[in-house]
Amino acid sequence: MSLKIGKCHCGAVQFEVDLPDGLQNIRRCNCSLCRRKGAVMASVPLKGLHVISGKDALRVYTWNSNTAKHYFCEVCGIYTHHQRRSNPNEYGFNIACIEGVDPYAFEDVTVGDGASQPITT
Ligand SMILES: [Zn+2]
């Protein structure tokens, strides 16, 4: 696995992720936003993810410290990726958007404790 294509549900937003070591840090998160989304996420360095179409359809949602940037498609509402607060040098992304990835194929997905992360800003 190296370069993979990700899409939102309607296909307006497409991105590519470079995954030389496969999906890394597969997890869910229990913060008040992620618990509502329920998405299974993985991480890439910022330079490893590029939106290749539909930039104008991407909306960004921020809350709390407004550090993390949560991107979603304004047409279909699907969360595609976010710039992380705990590591702003990384994007988390929705593995269910990635072609050929079954998000239900991973057993015992870790739940990150985003709810307990201190606000430092
Ligand atoms: Zn969409």
Image (cartoon, rainbow, N blue to C red):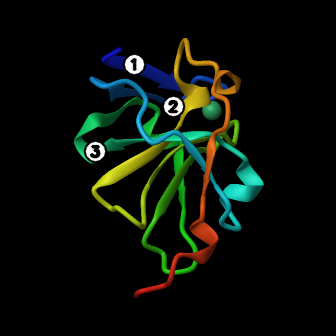
Residue where numbered disc 1 is placed? 4
Of residues 85 and 11, the one drawn nearer to the viewer in this rendering: 85
Tag 1: amino acid: Lys
Mark whose residue sits in front, 2 or 3: 3
- CB at disc 2 and ligand 1 closer than 8 Å: yes
- Element class at badge 3: strand
- Element class at badge 1: strand
Residue sitting at 73 percent across and 57 percent down? Answer: 35
Q: Position of residue 81 (x, y in %)?
A: 49, 44
Residue where numbered disc 2 is placed? 13
Above or below for 119 versus 45? below
Label 2, label 3: how far apart the Cα atoms are: 19 Å
Tell which circle, 1 or 3, labels the residue nearer the N-terminal end.
1
Tag 3: amino acid: Pro
Using residue 109 as the reference point, say whether residue 42 is left or right of it.
Answer: left
- Residue at the far left: name it: 47
Q: Position of residue 57 (x, y in %)?
A: 53, 41
Residue where numbered disc 3 is placed? 45
